[in-house]
Image (tube, helix red, strand yellow):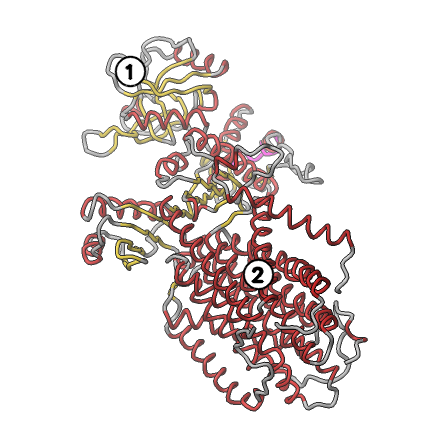
Amino acid sequence: MLYFSKWKIQAILLVCFLGIAYSVPNLLSREQAESLPTWLPHQRVNLGLDLRGGSHILLEVDVRAVVRERLENLVESVRRTLLDQRIGYTGGINIVEDRVVVRLRQVDQLPLAMENLRKLAAPVTSSLLGQSGTLDIQVQSQLDGQITLSYTEAAIQQKVTNAVQQSIEIVRRRIDETGVNEPTIQRQGADRILVQLPGLDDPERVKRLLGQTAKLTFRMVDTSPEAAAGQVPPGSERLPADDEVGADGRPREYIVRKRVEVAGDNLVDAQPNFDQRTAQPIVNFRFDAVGGRRFAETTRNNVGRPFAIVLDNKVISAPVIREPILGGSGQISGNFTVESANDLAVLLRAGALPAPLRIIEERTVGPDLGADSIRAGVIASVLGFVLVIIFMIASYGLFGIFANIALVMNLFLLMAALSVLQATLTLPGIAGIVLTMGMSVDANVLIFERIKEEFRGGKSVMNAVEAGFRRAFTTIVDSNLTTILTAAILFAFGSGPVRGFAVTLSIGIVISMFTAILVCRLMIVTWLRRARPKTLVI
Amino acid sequence: MRHLKLIPEKTNFTFMRWRNIAFALTALLTLLSVGFFFGRGLNLGIDFAGGIVIEVRSPEAASLGQMRAVLSRLPLGEVALQEFGSSNDVLIRIQRQEGDERAQQAAVEQVREALKRDVSEGISFRRVEFVGPKVSGELIEAAIYAVLISLIGILVYIWFRFEWQYGLGAVVTTVHDAIMTVGFFAVTGLEFNLTSVAAILTVIGYSINDTVVVYDRVRENMRKYKTMPLETMLDLCINETLSRTVMTGATTLLALLALFMFGGEVIRSFTAAMIFGIIVGTYSSVFVAAPILIHLKLKRGGEKGEGASPAGAEAD
């Protein structure tokens, strides 16, 4: 245990050197660290939101809405199929739980209906192997002429996955538009999205932007006689106005056709602007080729009639078409403020969410609290460090100094490891570092106490040191491994700050084994060779 | 040069003679912890109970009474205020609102407006946290799993490295420390949140560390003194490792005390629990972990190998 081969000494020194080199950027200011030449390490420890300030928002994709929307589309497809084949049905096409149910008027049309409805099913394209054979829709019939259509489990799974992935993309686009620096947007679990926004102390705007689905449609207002009489004809629906109030003080309602003439998917650009006549804030938009053509066609055929601009099932405005709009661009005017026009433009540019998002957890820390926490953490760490150093020298003298050098090395390596791994340092993480200092000293205490004991037992200095290190080694490994075990479990089950704590604690323990066992031993062995002491004063 | 010595070179305390008294005390404290846990319950933070926490700083010393009056006019149910660190900082806790997540958001806005309007324009919001009911339920589950799995992990690891008696003894000791720390939260009424679970797990880690050091010595001495009565031998083991136990405990406590005094209000309950847990962990490795081996009828011979150490061949 006392012999170190040359390469081993070099390896230990190299690790120490790298540790110092990679931790140096943390001692410099941000600007200094960034101006370092590229061949030098320049990564710094990643501070958690609780230290740098910012917002942590956990969103949940409303999976039920995804399924619901699919079912509603399926109802439309069934209606069209039956109409094309001239198959009559009674009682309408209904959604019962998660199935679409329709009853044919004539049972003998069942085979024809089944044949055509089965064509609605498409294979599920899944990235998982062996899944490609399944169809997305199951069609079943009963002898009395009732047909039930439902989505298969695989299809729903795939749709939810797609919806979450699409949502992440759109959330990213919306947040990029707000100009927040270094946002982190990642999927969490099956149907959740974690958004982290450093440096933001009031996430109201982001929350407002994320809270909207932003599904935009252009549809015709129903002007049939039934609608005028206040009834809702089939194929139409009653929608509230976004901001208009009717004579009775309640939001005004429109009866709007369900058929979508042009949808927001066909937009290529949207910009906030001011109406030249009224100086009201408006949003200008431009369609892509397909959308422009459809919009032109619709407006040409419906001059003189009102159409509705519908956002998330609310009518923003329902202007009358004065002339065909052929250029593929137009404007939305409503009761906008400058801010809301701007937000709407952002939402339209980023696209609609496939399903509503709900905020289920939010943690926002102001930057000044973060700075206070850093200051408190630094003061506590430095003080703890100084106390431990004094205590070690007082208790073990020269050996205490060795242990302290090992401890300093430990902190350098810890900083370096956190910087290189880009692990996140949180407030409990600082506590983890402080705790690591205490525990890292433990390995040296074990060794020194053992050396003392062996020396008292009558061994020579060399033999006592050798036996001390060797005997203490098993103990150190056993005790540290159990601690790492708990830290690993903490990491697996914890979230946010707690994970940061687990990371620093386990990295700290691994490093402390290196510094306490190898670095400290190397120093003591070198000292023994040079000084050749006859007796030990520990 | 004379060095500081917390413990004399050679001690001969007869710990095992006190073991029945220690067991009684341990049992009493454990029962008290359990009693407080069920009787009074934990002061669950929003991580587990759901709800809203807002930390505000007012430009001048905050008047809790005025804030309370303003906030209690809002239809938010129970609102608790407390000074947080300094007289300018106030922590506002609002119970979980009826309804879905949007209701929670609305509540935060109401508080913000009311405070700005009726208390002081200069109030700044230093921290806003809101945890929905679904998330808090999952967090409880994850925390319980974390503790249980780490206990099983420890049991298996020590069984594998030592003998089943040691594994069981270590788990009993660890459970004891965990219960006591939870009891600490129940008695003091400190807020129990995710970082508290981290504190408990750290205490578990530390306590197991301490226990393993003692057990390691027991394993070694079992081979060395084949005829010594178990009680005498356990006393010897504890005496031999006593200076290490005290030294390590002292350094760790020094570091934690610094954190407790200067580490800021946010992690104060976290460090308080760890300080308590480390004291308990040190006590339990001497008075629970060691004597329990007597009751588990640890046998001589047939111990597993030396583990990583090649020390077996050594002449003592």
Q: Nearer the viewer, residue B185 or A224?
A: B185
Q: Position of residue B259 (x, y in %)?
A: 44, 61
- In the rendered image, the residue lying farthest to the right is B313
Q: Chain of mark 2?
A: A
Q: Position of residue B107 (x, y in %)?
A: 30, 48
Residue B215, located in which quarter of the rendered image? bottom right
Nearer the N terminus, badge 2 or badge 1? Answer: 1
Q: Position of residue B307 (x, y in %)?
A: 74, 69
Tell me which amino acid carries mark 2.
Answer: Asn
Write the start and end of the magenta stretch as one range. Answer: A103-112
Q: Chain of mark 1?
A: A
Residue A87 shown in magenta = no
Residue A104 shown in magenta = yes
Residue A491, located in which quarter of the rendered image? bottom right
Whether residue A147 can be seen here: no
> Closer to us: mark 2 or mark 1?
2
Q: Main secondary structure of the magenta part?
A: helix
Tell me the residue that label 2 is attached to. Answer: A404
* Residue B115: numbered disc: none
Tell me which amino acid carries mark 1.
Answer: Asp
Instruction: Please state, as top left, top right, bottom left or bottom right, where the N terminus of chain A lies in the image.
Output: bottom right
Q: Nearer the viewer, residue A327 or B172?
A: B172
Q: Are marks 2 and 1 on the same chain?
A: yes
Whether residue A416 can be seen here: yes
Q: Height in image: B235 above or below A292?
A: below
Task: Tell me how far mark 2 sits from mark 1, CA to CA.
Answer: 72 Å
Q: Secondary structure at mark 2?
A: helix
Q: Nearer the viewer, residue B26 or B215?
A: B215
Q: Position of residue A449 (x, y in %)?
A: 63, 73
Q: Residues within 10 Å of mark 2 (few under 14, many from 20)?
A: many
Tell me the residue that label 1 is attached to. Answer: A275
Q: Height in image: A136 above or below A347?
A: below
